[in-house]
Image (cartoon, rainbow, N blue to C red):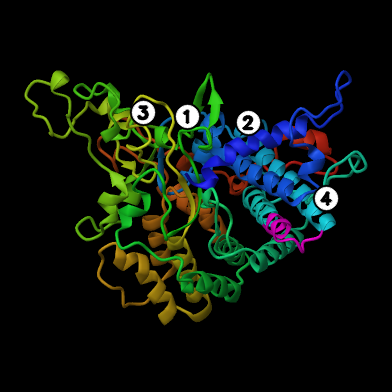
């Protein structure tokens, strides 16, 4: 069992310690060994708090927060997705996105909660002295949490407030004003630089097994490269990407689909994942006596159960499905269907009759299932395989959650960022840009590219390789083409996909100038004071 699979258990103990640290009027004896004082004044305690941060970070994907992860990872409101239904409709369709929209508020609160705890760890570590190795590692990991959280907030909201101090009774009364973006970037870059100097390339093994899932030097460098791309600092992006690529601990897998095969996505192409397992330490939350994982598989798997002859959820088909978000025809048409193996390995296109007891008349076992067009979008639309899960729910395919790991960063993105950075710095004929572009392009089965590289070629390869991994919206915004691409390609129309009964190109029609950023949650504006922190324009 991986150490990161035990984070939830440690997190529970840590939270208990935080809450029982107050004096009990009837009995002042500490009921648990973990106290708030212990957590922030000892190396082991500080390590426990950081470990709990991984669990807190992972709540982004869990049950009631599942739409937060879907919005972030499933290319909502971009040129690659077709959206059918779900609680994040306002963001997917851009038809009712307001400052009161709960998903936006939860996203803001999630990352500021991470930042608040990270500030406490950084402050406590510096007070204790970072000479101790455990304290130093906790300090570095907290800095990655803080940098990553500010980066995610800045990309979505443009205007955020900056705080690096632990919140306590002495500093509750403060004036909140939007930070200058250059100040936010300065903090992010400094935090990542500090972390890179401390963290190892691979997390060392411990008595509990390998600590897979914790931040490493590679994760900090990868985020540093992402930040550099936003700042158009091509030299910095190249330096960080080249460092990761040259590290022998990492490498692209020979088989593309293997990256996402299985429940434990712990392979040399993966830089960082949300770790899950269906047990006491597995990262899920306990609801009604059962462990609950995430719902990324449900959201991306069609509701094929409704189809005559399929009848029940099966592990072979991916288990429970809601059928909410799919690849659109524009994305699917980017692949050479004869050469590019990603077309079959990254997507499931067909479902088959497997149950002899409900086999429709005239059909044979193994035949491709068919459905009336009215049910196509919900029940048999092609799906991404990146969250496809026939492993963790094999014992109970009707379970409405998944315990498959979720990949957050992987080496394929590192290669493509490096290719783009070399392209911007050295031009269309850059040998390094073309070399790195070919890493994912040739691996997919395509002929080696030897021509002149263009931004459109890079953009298409980003789509083919990284679709539904949480990069597209930010990429389009960074390149200044979000509005153009959404209005041109988002969703599908009946002309593009004849199996549809109605157009589902909704964000394509609804995109307004202010959809380049999200509204500041109205509750936050009210608390900070609109005279100090006004709402984003348009909302």
Residue 138 in sight: yes
Q: Position of residue 522 (x, y in %)?
A: 73, 34
Tag nearer the camera, 1 or 3: 3
Q: Residue at x 82, y 47 (%)?
A: 166
In the rendered image, residue 207 lying in the magenta stretch gets the answer: no
Instruction: Answer whether labels 4 and 3 touch (C-beta < 8 Å).
Output: no
Q: How far is disc 4 from disc 3 in space, using C-alphas?
A: 44 Å
Quickly name the residue at label 4: 165
Instruction: Answer whether labels 1 and 2 touch (C-beta < 8 Å).
Output: no
Instruction: Answer whether labels 1 and 3 touch (C-beta < 8 Å).
Output: no
Q: How far is disc 2 from disc 4 in space, using C-alphas?
A: 27 Å
Q: How far is disc 1 from disc 4 in space, using C-alphas?
A: 37 Å
Tag nearer the camera, 1 or 4: 4
**What are the residue bounds of the magenta stretch?**
129-140
**Residue 167: quarter of image:** top right
Instruction: Answer whether labels 1 and 4 touch (C-beta < 8 Å).
Output: no
- Left or right, 372 with reference to 185: left
Q: Earlier in the sequence, mark 1 or mark 3?
A: 1
Disc 1 crowd, CA 10 A, few/some/many (<14, 14-19, 20+): some
Q: Position of residue 528 (x, y in %)?
A: 82, 39
In the displayed structure, 242 sits above or below 84; it is: below
In this rendered view, identify the residue nearer to me: 265 or 313.
265
Where the C terminus falls, by quadrant? Answer: top right
Q: Position of residue 105 (x, y in %)?
A: 66, 35
In this rendered view, identify the residue nearer to me: 530 or 162.
162
Q: Residue furthest left?
A: 362
Quickly name the residue at label 1: 86
In the rendered image, residue 139 lying in the magenta stretch gets the answer: yes
Quickly name the residue at label 2: 102
């Amino acid at each position: 069992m991986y150490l990161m699979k035990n984070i939830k258990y440690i997190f529970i103990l840590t939270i208990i310690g935080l809450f029982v640290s107050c004096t009990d009027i009837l009995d002042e004896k500490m009921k648990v060994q973990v106290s708030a004082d212990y957590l922030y004044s000892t190396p082991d305690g500080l390590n426990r708090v950081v470990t709990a941060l991984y669990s807190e970070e992972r709540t982004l994907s869990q049950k009631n927060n599942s739409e937060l992860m879907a919005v972030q990872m499933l290319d909502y409101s971009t040129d690659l997705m077709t959206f059918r239904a779900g609680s994040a409709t306002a963001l997917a369709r851009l038809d009712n996105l307001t400052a009161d929209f709960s998903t936006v508020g939860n996203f803001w609160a999630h990352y500021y909660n991470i930042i608040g705890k990270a500030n406490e760890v950084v402050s406590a570590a510096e007070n204790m002295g970072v000479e101790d190795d455990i304290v130093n590692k906790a300090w570095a990991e907290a800095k990655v949490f803080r940098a990553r959280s500010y980066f995610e907030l800045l990309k979505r909201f443009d205007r955020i407030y900056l705080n690096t101090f632990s919140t306590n009774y002495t500093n509750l009364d403060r004036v909140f004003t939007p930070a200058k973006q250059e100040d936010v970037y300065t903090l992010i870059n400094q935090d990542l630089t500090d972390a890179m100097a401390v963290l190892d390339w691979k997390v060392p093994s411990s008595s509990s097994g390998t600590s897979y899932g914790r931040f490493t030097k590679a994760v900090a460098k990868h985020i540093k490269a992402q930040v550099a791309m936003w700042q158009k600092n091509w030299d910095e992006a190249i330096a960080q990407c080249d460092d990761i690529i040259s590290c022998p601990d990492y490498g692209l897998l020979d088989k593309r689909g293997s990256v996402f095969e299985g429940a434990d996505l712990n392979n040399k192409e993966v830089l960082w994942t949300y770790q899950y397992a269906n047990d006491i330490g597995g990262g899920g939350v306990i609801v009604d006596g059962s462990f609950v994982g995430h719902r990324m598989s449900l959201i991306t798997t069609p509701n094929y159960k409704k189809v005559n002859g399929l009848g029940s959820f099966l592990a072979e088909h991916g288990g429970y499905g809601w059928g909410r978000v799919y690849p659109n025809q524009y994305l699917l048409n980017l692949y050479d269907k004869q050469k590019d193996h990603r077309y079959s390995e990254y997507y499931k296109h067909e479902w088959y009759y497997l149950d002899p007891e409900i086999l429709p008349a005239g059909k044979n076992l193994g035949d491709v299932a068919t459905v009336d067009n009215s049910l196509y979008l919900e029940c048999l639309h092609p799906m991404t395989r990146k969250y496809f899960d026939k492993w963790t729910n094999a014992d109970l395919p009707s379970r409405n959650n998944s315990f498959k790991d979720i990949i957050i960063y992987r080496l394929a993105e590192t290669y493509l960022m490096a290719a783009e950075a070399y392209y911007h710095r050295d031009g269309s004929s850059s040998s390094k840009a073309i070399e790195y572009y070919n890493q994912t392009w040739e691996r997919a089965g395509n002929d080696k590219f030897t021509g002149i590289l263009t931004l459109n070629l890079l953009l298409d390869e980003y789509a083919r390789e990284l679709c539904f991994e949480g990069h597209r919206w930010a990429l389009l915004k960074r390149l200044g083409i979000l509005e153009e691409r959404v209005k041109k390609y988002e969703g599908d129309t009946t002309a593009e996909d004849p199996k549809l009964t109605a157009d589902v190109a909704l964000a394509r029609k609804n995109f307004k100038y202010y959809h380049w950023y999200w509204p500041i949650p109205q509750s936050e504006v009210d608390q900070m004071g609109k005279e100090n922190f006004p709402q984003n324009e348009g909302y």
